[in-house]
Amino acid sequence: MAGHMSTDDAFVVGEDHATGFQASANALDALTTATVQSHADSPQKHLHAPADSSHVHGWLATHFHSEGLLSKMQSLENRHHLGNYVVDRRTGRKTWESMSLYVRLGMHLLYYGTEQEKLLHDQRALALLREQSEKMGREYDAPESRAHIQPFIDSFQLGASMREMVEPDPAAYPTFNAFFARQIKPSARPPDEPGNDAVASSPADCRLTAFPTVGAATRYWIKGFGFTTRRLLGGDDEALAARLDGGSIVIARLAPQDYHRWHAPVSGTVEAVREIPGAYYTVNPQAINEPGTMDVFCENRRSVMTIRRDGSGSPVVVVAVGAMLVGCIRYNEGMDRVGARVRRGDCLGAFYYGGST
């Protein structure tokens, strides 16, 4: 990793490691605590506050007390942009999405260590992210979290979209987590050309990036070291991994305000489902695109479903990847049963705040 860093970024190595890591850990804990203590507040005042805002700059200054540590942290942030451009494929309009504050802190945790391998085995980082994810899961499963639903809807202007949900009434959800994993009506998400087995549909309503081959994805998008199709699938099925290496890959990223369920991209039969334990690193594009960092897709907790596609009989693999704070992966009833039939567009499962299934 050191070969990819400027001298200004050198604070992430050596003697500042412990101080910088602890400052980030304390800040993340303070942020999640403030979030669950203020359900009635807009989420953009704490957990999802835009990382490039003056409010966030002031908040960070109170948690990174050392002037040297703060300035070095800002130097790292200058190198890793604090948001992403998103293009609407229908209109061609390009908009800027700022990184959330909690993701910004998660990025800091990816860059502490004398070398990348040290961080990979740094049990403090792994334990911290698991602990904070489980904390948010407990809090958002509590009945009191219902108070956060309406501020969340208002903050992200989701009111109109609620009409498309199976349960359109925000007051009917028993917890914030139940609302977060709200399910859309099938009529609101009809697949194109439903009778054409040669067509694949997006697995989620998301920020989607597609590549014709896995090789192209690793050249232009997935820059972390260690990514292979075999590792992504769990490492056991060499024949399946080899076959998929020549195939296409689609990465469907969900932002906090998005509908957090995923759907079958093709029609077919479920051949296998494998649960893979792992970490809860941020999966923000900055973590994926940076050369020399670990590959979070292959490190994070994930569930791997293999579908034998109708028509061609070829395998299609859907990998649900848990993330920082939102690490709980649950299938709809019966969808993870080997032999189950799925139709393109069927809802397969949902992501929740938390750290386990």
Image (tube, helix red, strand yellow):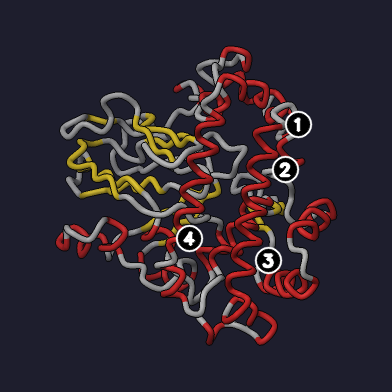
The C terminus, quarter of image: top left
- Dot 1 corresponds to which residue? 41
Q: Residues within 10 Å of mark 3 (few under 14, many from 20)?
A: some
**270 or 81, which lies in front?**
81
* Sequence-first tag of 4 and 3: 3
The residues bearing labels 2 and 1 have C-alpha atoms spaced at a distance of 8 Å
The residues bearing labels 4 and 3 have C-alpha atoms spaced at a distance of 26 Å
* Sequence-first tag of 4 and 2: 2
The residues bearing labels 4 and 1 have C-alpha atoms spaced at a distance of 31 Å
* Sequence-first tag of 3 and 1: 1
- Dot 3 corresponds to which residue? 81
**334 or 53, which lies in front?**
53
Amino acid tagged 1: Asp
Q: Are marks 3 and 1 in contact (CB under 8 Å)?
A: no
* Sequence-first tag of 2 and 1: 1
Residue 124: mark: 4
Disc 2 or disc 3, which is closer to the eye? 2
Against 176, residue 3 (above or below) is below
Q: Measuring 60% from the left and 56% from the top, which residue is drawn there?
A: 25
- Dot 2 corresponds to which residue? 46
Q: Quadrant of residue 9?
A: bottom right
